[in-house]
């Protein structure tokens, strides 16, 4: 059929279909992620904390509407956004909205889980990116599980130490530390929590349970080699007082360690879990340690878990000054 000069192909329908494909908050998150890296359905499901079937359905719609490229690697399907393959007007729209279409808090969570997923990919001997040499990691995990390495490394602790688990709760930290040191002093303000910890740790003969507040610890000055406060500081009215108390009970050169949430925006935690603080930035944690008189302070992010739904964690350590 003869084409007249003004009879140009109509791309309106294609562009409309492209834009309609983004009409969902989860799809916007998925597109942002696969623009950064080529990812599988399973990896994306872990990052966005959504069932794999739901993610798969959205990815299929995005691929069919032209947003994503799909390729196979063995039995895995990988998805990626390739900007150069998009129509110019759709590409311009995406470039205009991609930084603001997802809230900063969600972007931060997605970025943290993406980093963890990629880290697992780099160390997984079954990685689908051609690293199929040794399968020892898989064999070792099948034989011995995932958690034996960090648990066994606690054997590096000095067996003569006395350590406090401050705000011990049901005894998670004390349970891990007890086999490797002389004594654990487990302190909590709740008698019910201490009862639960006693039941959990009944087989451990080296744990001294004490009822008390972290702002006024029932421990004498300079009695301990180390002290741990795990996921408790955000519950306290005065974290600075608790850090000062931790410093008081340590020997010169003793080590204090705090695990707590990064600063976040989950206001609902105040109502649902009684949090007094919405986490702490690394700078804030370092300042708390410094004000309490600690030296050699370090604050580092804890390894991310892609399956974790809460904020990231930070581990901060410091030493009580040793006059010698």
Image (cartoon, grey):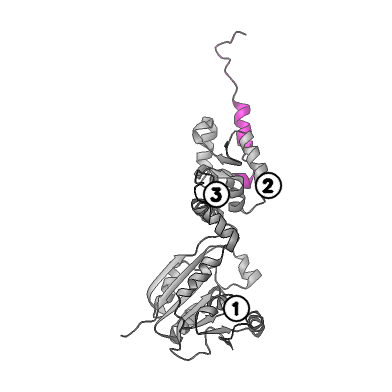
Which residues lie in the magenta part?
1-27
Q: Which is more toward the observer, 249 or 286?
A: 249
- Residue placed under numbered mark 1 in the picture: 171
Camera-near label (1 vs 3) is 3
- Dot 1: element: loop
Dot 1 crowding, Cα within 10 Å, few <14, some 14–19, many 20+: many
- Dot 3: element: loop
Look at 45% across and 89% down and name the residue there.
223
For the residues labelled 2 and 1, the Cα–Cα distance comes to: 38 Å
Image spot of residue 95 (x, y percent): 50, 39
Residue 249 drawn above or below residue 115: below
Q: Is residue 100 magenta?
A: no
Q: Quadrant of the C terminus?
A: bottom left
For the residues labelled 2 and 3, the Cα–Cα distance comes to: 25 Å
Place residue 76 in its image quadrant.
top right
- Residue placed under numbered mark 2 in the picture: 54
Residue 66 drawn above or below residue 275: above
Residue 317 visible in the snapshot: yes
Look at 44% across and 75% down and name the residue there.
288
- Residue placed under numbered mark 3 in the picture: 126
Q: Is residue 8 magenta?
A: yes
Image spot of residue 78 (x, y percent): 57, 41
Dot 3 crowding, Cα within 10 Å, few <14, some 14–19, many 20+: some
């Amino acid at each position: 059929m003869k084409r007249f000069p003004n009879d140009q192909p109509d791309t309106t329908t294609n562009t409309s279909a492209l834009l309609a494909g983004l009409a969902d908050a989860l799809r916007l998150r998925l597109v942002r992620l696969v623009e950064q890296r080529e990812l599988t359905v399973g990896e994306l499901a872990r990052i966005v904390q959504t069932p794999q079937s739901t993610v798969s359905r959205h990815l299929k719609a995005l691929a069919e509407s032209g947003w994503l490229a799909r390729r196979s690697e063995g039995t895995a399907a990988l998805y990626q956004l390739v900007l150069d393959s998009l129509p110019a007007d759709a590409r311009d729209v995406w470039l205009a909205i991609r930084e603001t279409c997802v809230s900063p808090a969600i972007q931060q969570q997605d970025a943290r889980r993406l980093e963890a997923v990629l880290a697992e990919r780099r160390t997984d001997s079954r990685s689908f990116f051609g690293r199929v040499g040794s399968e020892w990691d898989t064999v070792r995990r099948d034989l011995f599980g995932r958690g034996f390495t960090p648990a066994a490394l606690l054997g590096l602790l000095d067996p003569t130490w006395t350590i406090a688990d401050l705000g011990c709760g049901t005894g998670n930290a004390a349970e891990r530390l007890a086999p490797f040191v002389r004594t654990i002093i487990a302190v909590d303000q709740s008698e019910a929590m201490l009862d639960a910890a006693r039941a959990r740790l009944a087989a451990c003969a080296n744990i001294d349970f004490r009822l008390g507040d972290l702002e006024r610890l029932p421990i004498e000055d300079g009695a301990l080699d180390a002290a741990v406060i795990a996921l408790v500081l955000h519950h306290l009215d005065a974290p600075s007082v608790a850090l000062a108390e931790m410093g008081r009970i340590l020997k010169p050169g003793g080590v204090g360690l705090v695990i707590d949430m990064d600063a976040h925006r989950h206001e609902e935690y105040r109502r649902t879990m009684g949090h007094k603080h919405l986490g702490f930035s690394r700078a804030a944690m370092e300042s708390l340690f410094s004000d309490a008189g600690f030296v050699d302070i370090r604050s580092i992010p804890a390894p991310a878990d892609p399956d974790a739904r809460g904020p990231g964690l930070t581990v901060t350590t410091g030493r009580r000054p040793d006059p010698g």
